[in-house]
Image (tube, rainbow, N blue to C red):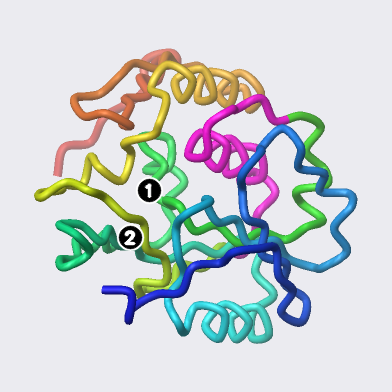
Amino acid sequence: SDDHARTMSSVSRFDNLSILLCRHLTEIDFHAISSEYILFIKNGDALSKYAMQCLTLRIALSSPDLIYSDEAILYDNKNKIFNFYKTDCSPELILSCNYFGNLLCVKTCLLKKIKQIDSKCYQNFLYEIVLKILPESKVIIHIDEVLYYSYSSKEKVSYEDFYADFDQAAGRRLLENYCKENSINASVMDARYHGTYRVKYVIQGEPLISII
């Protein structure tokens, strides 16, 4: 129910953190934002009542480069909740799917280094940001609490509904560009489920294999 969350109706400031409500992705100018961190929220979604407290505390304690959290979908007329509990940061897993999800809090200085973002839909937009700043991110924090809520009018939902708005072909191109820019000799193909991929690495030479 709405008791779990609050909807952000505008861009807000909390100490050194700016909340950026994403309506028109092409109009975002990171250089115009003076706060130390930017929190991205999709228009129409909501944060938990304790999200800002959790985020500002982690920022104060660790000064991370990037923060993400668990999230949930409110469905069946907001009477039921489907939770998505995530693993801690895995540089390999993030190349298979954007499990960081819809809540992304990033140091503004890292965002200002990004020359261009081409993604037009919100979920691909976040995935592109993650892939571009991942090589420079030293401290990535996963908050293992549900801080983000999206909504569905469906009577039943599954994990694939967390990627409902994700453009599969565009995501594959993002991964291919990531491999190219980071000198990774690999091909990218779609995996079984929507929003997931398989990165197939080219074996170099004739490496020895130990069977334990």
Asked if the magenta segment contains residue 127, the reply would be yes
For residue 4, the mark is none
Magenta span of residues: 117-139
Name the residue at 70% across, 61% down: 38
User: In the rendered view, does 203 fall on the left or right side of 141?
Assistant: left
How many numbered discs, if any? 2
Q: Does dot 1 land on a helix, a strand or a loop?
A: loop
Q: Position of residue 144 (x, y in %)?
A: 36, 73
From what the image shows, is residue 83 above or below residue 29?
A: below
Magenta span contains residue 30? no
Relative to 140, 150 lies left or right: left
Instruction: Specify the quadrant that holds the C terminus.
Output: top left
For residue 202, above or below residue 54: above
Mark 2 packing: few (<14 Cα in 10 Å), some, or many (20+)?
A: some
Q: Which marked residue is nearer to the observer: mark 2 or mark 1?
A: 1
Against 206, is 79 above or below? Answer: below
The residue under the point 44% across, 58% down is 45
Secondary structure of the residue carrying numbered label 2: loop
Residue type of the residue flagged with mark 2 = Thr
What's the residue at 35%, 72% (across, down)? 146
Instruction: Name the quadrant containing residue 190.
Output: top left
Which residue is label 2 attached to?
A: 87
- Residue 38 versus residue 184: which sits nearer the camera? 38
Q: Are marks 2 and 1 in contact (CB under 8 Å)?
A: yes
Residue tagged 1:
99
Q: Position of residue 158 (x, y in %)?
A: 16, 47
CA gap between label 2 and label 1 equals 8 Å
The N terminus, quarter of image:
bottom left
Across and down, in percent, residue 59 comes to: 65, 78
